[in-house]
Amino acid sequence: MAFLNSYEEASEQLVNKHKGSFYVPANATYSHIQKISDTTGFIREKFPVKYLGVSIYAGRQKSTHFANIISQTVNKIQGWKTDLLSSGGRLILIHHILIALPIYTMNAMPIPTTVVRGFHRILANFFWGSYEGSPKRHWKSWSTIAQPREGGGLGVLNLNHMQFAFRTKMLWKALTTDSLWARFFRGKHLYSCHHSEAHFPFMLAADRKLWKQAAHIIQRNHRIVSMNSSPTAYFWYDAWTGEMPLKEFIPEVIWNNMSDKYCTVQQAFNNPMSFQLQTATKYCPRHLLSQFLTSNGTKDTWIWCPTANGKFSTKYVRSLLAPANSQQWAALWSPHIPPKWSVLLWRLILNSIPVDETVKEKGVPLVSKCSCCPQPQEESSLHLFFRSDTADQVWSELSHLLHFSNREVSAVTDGVTAFLARPEIIATSGRLVRCIFMAALWEIWCSRNKARFQDQGMTAKHIINRTMLSIRAICISFKFQKVPQPWLAALHQTEHDMEELKSRTPTIVRWITPPSGRLKLNVDGTFMRTLGTAGGGGILRDHEGNMCWAFARAYHDLNSSLAAEAMALNDGLSICCSKGVSEVLVETDSLNLLQLVTKQISSQWDLTCIMHDIAAKSLNLKAEIAHVPREANRVADCLASSAMSYPRFVIWSS
């Protein structure tokens, strides 16, 4: 109590003993509890206790400690009129509200698997809807829904992946920072070993596997910018010379008999004749030890490779756990496409639309009768959307816009994916084609439901009119440009709306000569992802447009067009330095490169060294760098494209 009295005197604030409480173990004696209460004036409370929104408990973790997450979720859902929400509306609410409820707690401590499963069950019931208080059939598992959109899911956050990402983030902080907590963590769990080989003996058995997986992810996706004066980077285990640790190059027999495996970079370089340096020189590629990742700092810098800026992100941890992306799934989603359309086509591709045929496949006996033909037939997805009399009329009416024949569709999944995979659908100019295809399918489905449950007639004219109204609203809302004339006629636009959708007036773009007495350098880079090749080129011209010199060079081991652009700029500035050119004007058609050079955006970690070189040379040359459209940089673009055909660095003089 002396401490509390001192606090009251120093702060001139009184401690409210009626609101204060104390906590003791469950096996504490009554006399002990009473003595504390009499001394402090506080009352006894029992665990768990809520502090800063997180439950603090003693002993084993129980599901009841996280009951507030479930109750908050249920209360949110009960306040919504779920019957009035479309599947797209439910998906938006899950994305932006419900899935965020457990994140704060999850960041502080792991949530039991039973709680996560219960939370997922509530979200699944909400998404698929209910009838008379009972949940409807779940046509797809939650594990499928909780996949990225490009991987065949609906983009809902996977909480199991999120838990793993948070543990990886915690381990990353322990490795890369020097706080009191980080030093404690390393001393307790990583004592005398590298994180990639840690067993985490003091962790709970249920969490141990998770921490080992986190260490494995970090080991495969980290780099270290190593400084000789910093003792944190391990010579053999950490990736400080390239894409992989040096130990990967050492034969197994040599590695197993090596004594000092946990030697740091500092310890190895303190003695030029050390066993580590001699072994690395003998077995590792020669260029590795000469291409140090350098920095201007005094400490080792840890780099998270999946991100451009090298900073850790839980988003990219989750992307490493997700399935491979597919263009057919990516085509379903776009800002100008209503989510309800995307969800319908997602279900259509996965054969999860509750037409009669699909319902019968689930073991529900019924007599099938379609609502889309004068002579009713058995209802299936193929019949309803592509083969029925109504569908025939709809697709025939739209065929001049879509260039699509419904009679060529033999299977719904193949037909939809083949249409969305067409090059003109993926390109920007195909936005209207994709929209009208999805809108027509949505209106066919809505018209079928009204005919089935509200006894309204299902007509092709009504479906087409509703489709065109939806497309017209999208065109106006998103201000689509360069709408083709056939589309304008089909959408029946008024004169006012026609003005809104007219294409923009072309702008004249050309290369402009520099002022008299000045020289202008144009540079460009190109990267062909399919071939893994890159090249750069540039040309220096005077105020009359005459060429002073030009260059072209092929680049190897690059992974982006931005890296090729930076290499080309660096080569152009290097030639200027060697030829005594100063106060040069530089033009590039890469806006990102200009923003990196002018430090409007942070540099990517793998471009740090090259950007330092560019900054130093620009300062030395007093260079002025500007952005121009690609059309004004055609000569440099052609040089960059042709650079890959030259085996060596080529320079042409005037």
Image (tube, grey):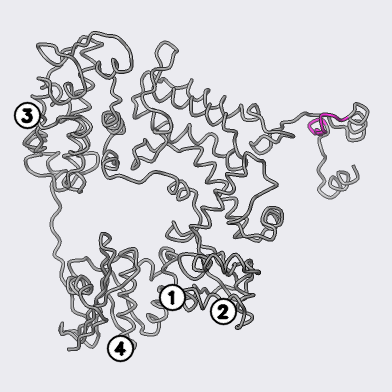
What residue span does the magenta drawing correspond to?
A: 18-28
**Where is mark 4, residue-wise?**
581
Cα distance between the residues tagged 2 and 4: 44 Å
| Mark before the other along the chain sequence, 1 or 2 | 2
Q: Which mark is residue 278?
A: 2
Q: Quadrant of residue 157?
A: top left
Does the magenta segment cover residue 274? Answer: no
Above or below, comparing residue 87 to residue 56 in the picture: above
Does the magenta segment cover residue 20? Answer: yes
| Mark before the other along the chain sequence, 2 or 4 | 2
Mark 4 against mark 1, which lies toward the viewer? 1
Cα distance between the residues tagged 3 and 2: 76 Å
Q: Residue at x 44, y 56 (%)?
A: 306
Left or right side of 357 for 601: right
**Where is mark 3, residue-wise?**
396
Q: Mark 4 touching mark 3, by CB under 8 A? A: no
**Where is mark 1, residue-wise?**
612
Q: Amino acid at mark 2?
A: Gln
| Mark before the other along the chain sequence, 3 or 1 | 3
